[in-house]
Image (cartoon, coloured by chain):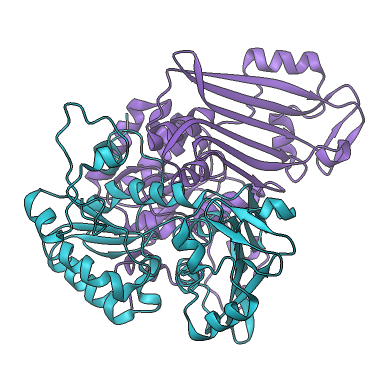
Chain colours: A cyan, B purple
């Protein structure tokens, strides 16, 4: 296990997680990735450090060139070609050269605003419009997310942060739209994003955040993909602390227009923290078993909670009875 | 195209479907499968004639031994090994020998009460219980379904039909439970099914059915899969004519208990007729591209409405950018 946080380095990962360490070989945390990868036979490396392709690329290369498969939760890696086509080609080339696979996944992008819509569309003969909405609470998240999403700042500070790009907000709309478009054969020529403040009318307090009345309690992001001026994909993603305090329901909603129409709701929204961990772990056997190259969630079998023997799932599927 | 119905034989399938035939090569309907398969190069054959493995097996064999891939909507074929392990092994052997794939699919089993639950579980680290409910209207269906489901018969006739097995009801619980169990690694040792009458308190009239007050307006089927006496999978499937007349909402509902819990609703239910056609057509490129053998929906990529070029979807997935 590799982590650069000083408080973890040199400690046993099991102990840090509060697990029983009695009689177990310690899993020591190192801050040197070369040391970690060099000392142990590794099937697959999970990289959970970045959001952007350009930032995670060197780490992926480090693993891939040692012949190790990679799963990453970097949002842009869910469809790396969407915004980084050259690095995507380079990763595909490297993966094939070293006979391993690379997959970006997560709860969003990765499932709730893209792959799940794709899956439901399997019951349709035609799709003219896809609308995915994920409204979620930011209350479970820690200080970093509070900062990234501008919780508690003023409206002026928010506007400034949007303008200079220091407020990241959600990363993944380009990738979700690209995945839906590619899967269905529903092309678009333009994708526009919007980022609006959620200004609270009452004081809101979450474990790691506070927004006074009149200040920012969250960010409402949306994206619209159009073809010849006509919208084909709409993505709506408001995130805020303590939504229940002001009567805002959270949930995941997918509306597919076509033949037939399909309206889906998951209420409350699927928990983003556990969901991301689950997705990253549940794809492991499929990534190890996959043919070499840069993959997306469209390329592997339907995700599932893997509780059985990994080998049964990835290699035993053609043997019935 | 092959169909034994006398009214279709010798006619142009396009004309029968009300499509424009001008300038098109006729697609003549024949009642001789050997003639149809012998005269044309065929990538994949869609068999939509049966519900049970033993009935559809000879037809599948006819295609597979000629080197043709098979998609079938026979319900039991969604997991052929669930109730016909020996025929499943034989089909797997034949498919591998002739280097083709065989896949059973459909809206249910195939998606709404199994694969969709599997897909949602991808966001979970643990699942202790799966509940799938599909409540749908039978009103869009024709005379055959009215008869199979006992619409309009008396309660005594219903009880008799259940007892002597002449009322089929829904076929697919064994297969849906097997698919969920296999995907998640959630074993069960016992599966029990129930079939209860839906007795109407008012007269109900659908285009092809009529149930007088006090008679059968539908069938409520359910199944429970248990491990050591504890339920792990519950399947509930009430179907009736004109449910809206008595204030019954229709829909597809999935409740997954675990970490985290997930509650999904699709309202109204996904249309079974169009949905089945869509599933059978949308899996075609994946079945043609798949490795040889008897497959399930767990073995191919996530289903999707295929509107683009089939070849892009089945073969172009590793080439990004």
* Image x and y of residue B225, in percent: 50, 22
Residue at 46 percent across and 70 percent down: it is A171
Q: Nearer the viewer, residue A181 or B315?
A: A181
Left or right: A68 in relation to B246? left
The image position of residue B224, as x and y in percent, is: 55, 22
Query: Where is B272 relative to B308, above or below?
Result: above
Q: Is residue B74 above or below residue A29?
A: above
Residue A320 screen position, x and y as percent: 32, 33
Is A86 above or below relative to B236?
Answer: below
Relative side of A95 to B240, left or right: left
* Residue A155 picture quarter: bottom right
> In the image, is B133 to the left or to the right of A302?
right
Relative to B268, is A109 on the left or the right?
left
Front residue of B144/A263: it is: A263
Residue toward you, B144 or B80 = B80
Residue A146, position in %: x, y?
51, 62
Residue at image coords 31%, 54%: B290
Report whether residue B12 is seen: no
- State whether residue A186 appears in this view: yes
Q: Is residue A156 above or below residue B171?
A: below
Give the residue displayed 50% in from the left and 75% down from the top: A167
Question: Which residue appears farthest toward the left when viewing the image?
Answer: A39
Q: Quadrant of the C terminus of chain A?
A: top left
């Amino acid at each position: 296990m590799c982590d650069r946080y000083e408080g973890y380095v040199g400690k046993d990962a099991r102990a840090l997680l509060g697990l029983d360490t009695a009689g177990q070989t310690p899993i020591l945390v190192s801050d040197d990735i070369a040391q970690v990868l060099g000392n142990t036979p590794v099937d697959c490396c999970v990289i959970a450090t970045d959001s952007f392709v350009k930032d995670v690329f060197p780490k992926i290369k480090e693993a891939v060139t040692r012949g190790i498969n990679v799963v990453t939760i970097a949002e842009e890696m869910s469809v790396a070609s969407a915004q980084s086509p050259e690095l995507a080609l380079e990763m595909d080339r490297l993966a094939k050269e070293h006979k391993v696979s690379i997959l970006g996944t997560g709860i969003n992008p990765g499932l709730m605003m893209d792959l799940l819509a794709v899956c439901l569309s399997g019951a349709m003969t035609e799709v003219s419009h896809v609308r995915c909405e994920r409204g979620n609470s930011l209350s479970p998240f820690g200080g970093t997310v509070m900062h990234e999403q501008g919780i508690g700042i003023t409206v002026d500070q928010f506007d400034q942060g949007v303008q200079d790009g220091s407020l990241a907000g959600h990363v993944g709309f380009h990738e979700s739209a690209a995945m839906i478009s590619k899967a269905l054969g529903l092309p678009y020529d333009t994708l526009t994003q919007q980022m609006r403040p959620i200004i609270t009318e009452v004081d809101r307090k979450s474990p790691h955040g506070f927004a006074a009345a009149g200040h920012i309690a969250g960010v409402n992001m949306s994206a619209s993909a159009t073809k010849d001026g006509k919208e084909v994909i709409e993505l709506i993603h408001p995130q805020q602390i303590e939504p229940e305090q002001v009567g805002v329901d959270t949930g995941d909603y997918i509306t597919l227009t076509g033949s037939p129409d399909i309206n889906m709701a998951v209420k409350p929204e699927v928990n983003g923290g556990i969901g991301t961990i689950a997705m990253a772990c549940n794809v492991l056997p499929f990534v190890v078993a996959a043919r070499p190259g840069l993959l997306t969630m469209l390329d592997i079998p339907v995700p599932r909670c893997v509780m059985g023997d990994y080998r049964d799932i990835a290699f035993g599927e053609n043997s019935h009875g």
